[in-house]
Amino acid sequence: MAEKVFTRNFDRPNSHTLAVYRETGGYTALPKALAMEPAAITEEVKKSNLRGLGGAAFPTGMKWSFIPKGSTDPKYLVINADEGEPGTFKDRYLLERDPHALIEGMIIAARAIDSHRGFVYIRGEYVQPWRVFSGAVKEAYEAGLLGQNIQGSGFDFDIVVHRGAGAYICGEETGLLSSLEGKKGWPKIKPPFPAVKGAFGHPTIVNNVETIAAVPHIINRGAAWFAGLGTKTQGGTRLYSVSGHVVKPGVVEAPVSVTLRSLIYDHCGGIRPGHRLKAVVPGGGSAPILTADEIDVTMDADGLKAAGTMIGSAGVIVMDETVSIPEALMVLARFYAHESCGQCTPCRESTGWIYKMSERIVEGKGRKEDLDTIVDVSKRGAGTTICAFYDGAVGPYVSYIEKFREEFEALIPRDNEPTCPS
Amino acid sequence: MADARRPEFNSDQLAEVRRLQGLYPDKRGALLPVLRLAQETFGYVSLEVEEYVAGLFDLSAAHVHEVVTFYTLFFQQPPGRHVVSVCHNLSCHLMGSKAIVQHLSQRLGVAVGETTADGRVTLLTVECLCACEQAPMMQVDDRYEGLLTPEKVDHILEGLR
């Protein structure tokens, strides 16, 4: 049985309260961190090989080190709790079942980057997670864990809980910052990176909920311990959100080196009875799809990259043989068309047109050149936009067609059959 | 419910607006929270509400309008007393969300995007609400309802007055 780090409190009654969090060692990392030099905290996180658990898998300690040294500008710590990647739900569990781990991690991270104000951007639809997390923040203030002169250390830190209003793009870190600033959630051109010029024009670190929830454990038990749970290039366990046609869908904690096969068959009870595996999306809707023959891969960022896909947010969507891949692609294409923010032409136009084409294919009105057109337009547009949204859409567009082309072709009327005018 | 055509916050709400504006380095950061407060107060974000809120932020109404229209949770028309939003993204699709939407549409006698004639329920489809372990699922006002079946949907609808 693998070690439980993130989920160790999940099944304890009232795990969202300060009292229960303290029972399992909560807030014991904080005094240690407050006694450390800020640079030593960052160094410890670097050595732990913690990588961002929101999607990009960027090394967390390195990100923190990008805050300009000696800058007297106010600095902000922003938590991305705008969970929205299709197939992902682990941050909801953390907010509801272990909110103090996030708060403690935030105070430690803030100390490391010399920030005195943190914002937690929670997606607007998350009403219950917002309620629970806000209650935890209130409790932390009442216990002197937030506010001025925390535990007599002379360190001040405040948390502002900010609610989104419904837009997937605000999970992109610069789109999130635009939204936090009271604007529509348009991503910003990088550089400058947020660490140099972020929220309200000031140096800002944006980290995912789960990433920051790992920090107290790293401070408490040491970088070597955390690094040792994972691979050479990525430390720790992490939370996998598993959904679709498995016997036991849910949040699973496992080392980053777990295989996709083990996640499905050992942790989630395998495929529902009487059915067999057809395909898996390993890292949220934007991850290229894997076939049933491709699941002997490790789930660390580099392992999945080598397999031509990505870990992303670790949302694992399992499909059995009843699934129509063209329909699944249409569902995702509809999502990307709806959520494109409209700022960059390749994304705005391609997502709309590809949705229309995927829809007509499913309706039996596709044209024989449609598949090549989708792949061609996808590949040309990748890398040409301000943010990674469109690159994320290209993952499914191309991989679904390339790996299940015959299934798409079977839906497209042949040359000698007239197509209905649409 | 206060009048969305002639919106005005009371003194407590204005104090809350000022408190929210003070939480951000630039008061504009409070625009989304204040728009949420406005929607809760006036029922929806009318053009008049946009103009009123713009005045509280020293912004043009156009700037507020582009924010309101960008996000899905701001209603520009009065919604029903209850809003039912069915997830139709991938995991819910795999677990039968299409049949749930059809069932709701039939039971309520409205198409997606419409409100029942008695103003009771607005039916929407939405993108991933991130509760895929409970697929198919939907949001009913503030709460999530998952592992939906037609029978469970009927039961939930009965509770909406």
Image (cartoon, grey):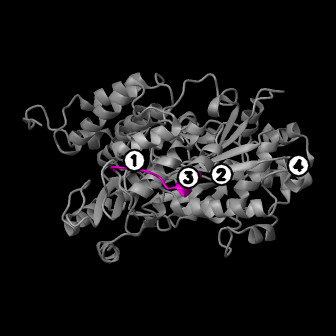
Q: Which residues are magenta?
A: B5-15
Badge 3 vs badge 2, beta-carbon distance below 8 Å: no
- Amino acid type, label 2: Glu
**Left or right: A174 with respect to A23?**
left
Q: In the image, which disc is placed on residue A260? A: 3
Residue type at mark 1? Thr
Could you confirm whether marks 4 and 3 are on the same chain? yes
Spatial CA distance of label 3 from label 2 is: 20 Å
Q: Same chain for marks 3 and 1? A: no
Residue closer to the observer: A278 or A69 = A69
Q: Give residue B82's position: percent from left, percent from top.
A: 34, 65
Q: x%, y% of residue B116?
A: 22, 63
Three-letter residue code for mark 3? Leu
Say which of marks 2 and 1 sits in front.
1
* A337 falls in the magenta region: no
Chain to which the residue tagged by mark 2 belongs: A
Please, what secondary structure does the residue beneath circle 1 have? loop
Tag of residue A210: 2
- Pair 3/2: label in front: 2
Q: Quadrant of residue B111?
A: bottom left
Helix, strand, or loop for circle 4?
Answer: helix
- Which mark identifies residue A34? 4
| Residue at image coords 34%, 25% | A377
- The chain under label 4 reads A
Q: Which residue is mark 1?
A: B72
Marked residue nearer the N-terminal end (4 or 3): 4
Could you tell me which residue is drawn at 35 percent across and 61 percent down?
B83
Task: Measure the C-alpha gap from mark 2 to mark 1.
Answer: 26 Å
